[in-house]
Image: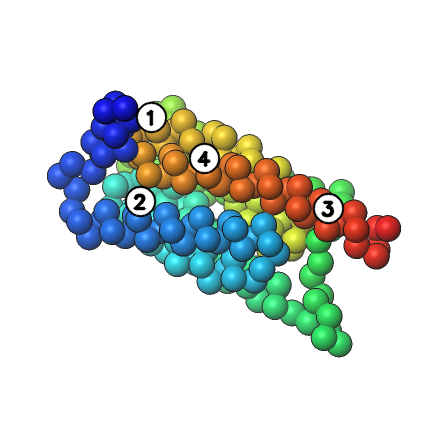
Amino acid sequence: MNQIFDFFLSAYQGRSWSLILLEATAFFFGIASVIYAKREDIMVYPTGLVATVITFYLFYVDRLFGDMMMNFYYSIMSIYGWWNWSRTKEKQQVVVISRTNTREKGIGFIFFLLTMFITYSVYQWFGKALEIPNYIDIITSGIFFTAMWYMATKKLENWTLWIVGDLITVPLYAYRGWGMFALQYFIFTLLAIQGYKQWKNSLNNSPATS
């Protein structure tokens, strides 16, 4: 039991209380955001924006540039998603849950490659030596940015990408000693599985697919 507490607390020894409080705030709003996403509630975006802006700053302080860029992308895509989900026509939502078509799969793959390239370039710009965890950052950045775009356009496949990316991120953050973030992404994984099931049921029961 002591080892479990040491895992979650050791990384915060010597860390300022202001940064710990910011991380706890990001943790709370991050979980809230995924819960809202699962419910197809537009509050996913304001809550998510709070979490990503705070996390962007935390990763900047710790010079984790791949994770930093990932949260920068989150923030930009959250603004787009907020606008897109809020659009209505004749009091009906313009964007509804659907599956990706071939064109959207292609765009998603381009986003994946482009995001990895930009994240890699950021590491090079800051002159940081790349190790295996950094390359994992680069890959997950591509996965998560594509997932954000699919979520912004209410594509069912966003949840599949979240699940894959979260499963990669949990052990990565645990390895780095980021106990709170590792726990957060473990919870994200469980919520993403639930989100996939809930959105799939909604899609199957919608008039357009029934």
Q: In this view of the protein, can residue 80 be seen by the observer?
A: no
Camera-nearest residue between 142 and 48: 48
Disc on the earlier residue, 4 or 1: 1
Disc on the earlier residue, 2 or 3: 2
> Image check: 105 left or right of 5?
right
Q: Nearer the viewer, mark 2 or mark 1?
A: 1
Disc on the earlier residue, 1 or 3: 1
The residue wearing badge 2 is 59
Of the residues shown, which amino acid type is indicated by label 2? Answer: Phe
Instruction: Say if 46 sits above or below 143 in the image.
Output: below
Disc on the earlier residue, 2 or 1: 2
Q: Name the spot of residue 182 as percent of width and height, x first.
A: 38, 34
The residue wearing badge 1 is 175
Of the residues shown, which amino acid type is indicated by label 1? Answer: Tyr
* Residue at 27 percent of width and 24 percent of height: 1
Q: Residue furthest left?
A: 14
Crowdedness near tag 3: few (<14), some (14–19) or many (≥20) residues, C-alpha within 10 Å: few
